[in-house]
Image (cartoon, grey):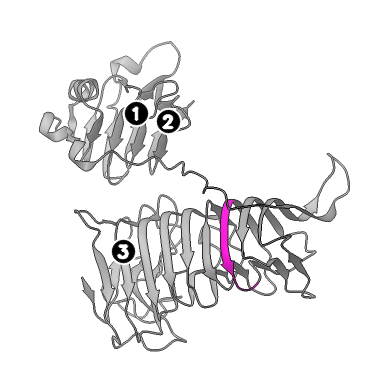
Amino acid sequence: VDIAADPVIVRPAIRVTGYGTKRPVLVLADGTPGYQDKDNESYLVFFAGSRGNGRAGRGGRGAPATGRPSDAGAGTFYSAMSNVDIEIGDGNPGAVGVRGTYAQHSFLAHMDFHTGSGIAGVHDTGNVMEDVRFFGGQYGIMTRTPSPSWQFTAVDAYFEGQREAAIWETAAVGLTLVRPHFHNVPTAVAIDKDQSENLWIRDARLEDIGGPAFLIARSGNPRNEINMENVVCRHVPVFAEFREGGRRVAGPSEIYEVKTFSNGLYYADMGAAGEMKEIMEASPLAAMPEPAPSDLAPLPPADTWVNIRSLGAVGDAKTDDTAVFQKAIAEHRTVYVPSGNYVISDTLQLKPDTVLIGLHPSMTQFDLLDKTAAFQGVGGPKPMIEAPKDGTNIMIGIGVYANGINPRAVAVKWMAGKDSDRKSTRLYSSHLGISY
């Protein structure tokens, strides 16, 4: 899909999901007018915080011009893009792939960003990314503090070929990286001058890093919390550099593992005085180990999904669909639940490998009607959905509403094991949302 001078505006709570035998790609053609000013970026995809008409325009920040949507913000929930790649052609030095300053239940997932001559794959973001890859660009991600002032988490992210840094932080981000892979970049993470940061990285892989892998500011400031675990490096001569004073932490060999790197305020015990401290536990390796395995549970192939509507469910917020779901769970592994309000009147007991898939937790909901008999009277909590102990269950994109006068109701009882996954799920209850 060719993108012209106007960006794709994603309104609040809209999710854009690609499908098909190959991922769809949003392509910005070479030398597209409107993407030439490297000092005033323009976006291919703009996540909005309002439903005003018109285009996002250049920059997209602050008070919008008349008719333009504002930036997404702390009240922008459920916006997302998944399984869509972005490609920026040559001669677009002002281009950015995505701007998404959204909040809860919002994400980017399963996406490749080929940024080329552009500024960044993503400029300013929030909440979470999963399974994303960034190629080229001045930066892969450039971002500030997310709009709800929570941390920004990226899981299974890959960066290659950025011109200045894979990630550039312009303000405290609360950056949390799980299994990131950085390859052939000058710097993996650059924290802007005079900025404190709460940085946590685990199971990282760094290869061919030309400059300092981590450029850290405000060394010695108690608000700086830098912590890394299990970072393996090849051709990374300078592991960290501190902007103040230029102190460098060198790697011990051509290939090495950093078991722990920590810099910040330490307390030896409760009540003890704090002290600034740095810990570096690193050792040479003979060869690079295998990458840490992902713990993101893959969805079953789409051709194995069974649509609950085809089995007789109605989803009209009135009809009791309990029996249809119970039969579907008994006979099928993967149940796709289209948008709708599905009334249930008893617990849906999942099998150990049951997968429930929705696309939007505020549009696909399990509901209890007021005074549902099975959830009345005296007794312990009773779940609407129960996942068995040590199961490999997945529940994604579904809202569960244990509302009304149902004093024993619990939305979800989740006892599944470490290989299960429950995400982008909205739980609402007058009593308990979830138990384990």
Task: Identify the residue at horizontal 52%, vertical 65% (top origin).
Answer: 183
- Residue at disc 2, secondary structure: loop
Judge from the rendering whether residue 260 lies leftward or rightward of residue 405; answer left or right: right
Q: Which quarter shows the N terminus?
A: bottom left
Of 50 and 211, nearer the camera is 211
| Residue hosting label 1 | 404
- Residue at disc 3, secondary structure: strand
Q: Which residues are magenta?
A: 203-211
Task: Find the residue positioned furthest to the front.
Answer: 286
Going from N to C along the chain, the mark reached first, 2 or 1, is 1
Mark 3 nearby-residue class (10 Å; few <14, some 14–19, many ≥20)? many
- Give the amino acid type for the residue marked by disc 1 in the picture: Gly
Q: State whether residue 206 is above or below residue 303.
A: below
Q: Is residue 207 magenta?
A: yes
Of 171 and 185, nearer the camera is 185
- Give the amino acid type for the residue marked by disc 2 in the picture: Ser
- Give the amino acid type for the residue marked by disc 3 in the picture: Asp
Going from N to C along the chain, the mark reached first, 3 or 2, is 3
Q: Which mark is residue 85?
A: 3
Q: CA distance from mark 3 to mark 2?
A: 40 Å
Q: Residue 180, position in %: x, y?
A: 52, 56
Q: Quadrant of residue 386?
A: top left
**Contact? badges 2 and 1 (CB < 8 Å):** yes
Q: Residue 150, position in %: x, y?
A: 55, 55
Q: State whether residue 186 is above or below residue 151.
A: below
Q: Residue 303, position in %: x, y?
A: 18, 40
Judge from the rendering whether residue 404 lies leftward or rightward of residue 22; answer left or right: right
Task: Identify the residue at horizontal 42%, vertical 30% (top origin).
Answer: 430
| Residue hosting label 2 | 430
Mark 2 nearby-residue class (10 Å; few <14, some 14–19, many ≥20)? some
